[in-house]
Image: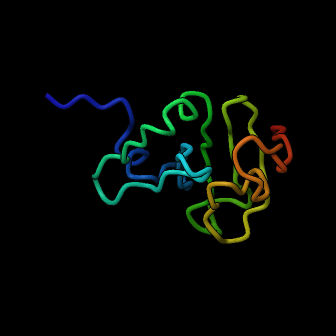
Amino acid sequence: PVVSLIPADLAAGTAGGYRYAVFLPNADGGALAEPDGSDVRPKDAKAADAQEGMWIAYAWPANAKTGAKMFAMTEDGQIRSATYLGEDPRWDDVFNGGGWGADPGWDPYEAP
């Protein structure tokens, strides 16, 4: 039997008109790359301690018709948003390029 905790569309990276990605730290202060296809994310033993406490999850429109905002959540649990300008977010966009441990620069999200 196949057990799935994540719906197939979300596991493929898109659901509800949005694309999704999660980033973990690597040992060099950057983020692990997304795996290709169905490959598993590569292990990075030197970054294991950082990966236990830091992560970033992004959601952004799959196209201009599905939304105007992109969203990010870090390990602090605060959802933040920024205007979607048509490009996929880089791993450190919520930190305005400052990297792990920098103060997030996006605005806290407030539901309308």
Relative to 88, residue 112 above or below = above
| Rendering quarter of residue 10 | top left
Relative to 74, residue 37 above or below = below
| Rendering quarter of residue 66 | bottom right
Q: Residue 109 at what x, y percent from top left? A: 81, 41
Relative to 80, residue 5 above or below = above
Residue displayed at 18% across by 31% down: 2
Depth check: 7 or 21 in front?
Answer: 21
Chosen colour scheme = rainbow
Residue sitting farthest toward the left: 1
Residue displayed at 61% across by 28% down: 53
> Where's the C terminus, which quadrant?
top right
Q: Image check: 10 left or right of 94?
A: left
Q: Residue 8 at what x, y percent from top left? A: 34, 44
Residue displayed at 61% across by 65% down: 88
Q: Residue 46 at what x, y percent from top left? A: 48, 39
Q: Residue 99 at what x, y percent from top left? A: 71, 51
Q: Image check: 44 left or right of 3?
A: right
> Where's the N terminus, which quadrant?
top left
Depth check: 23 or 7 in front?
Answer: 23
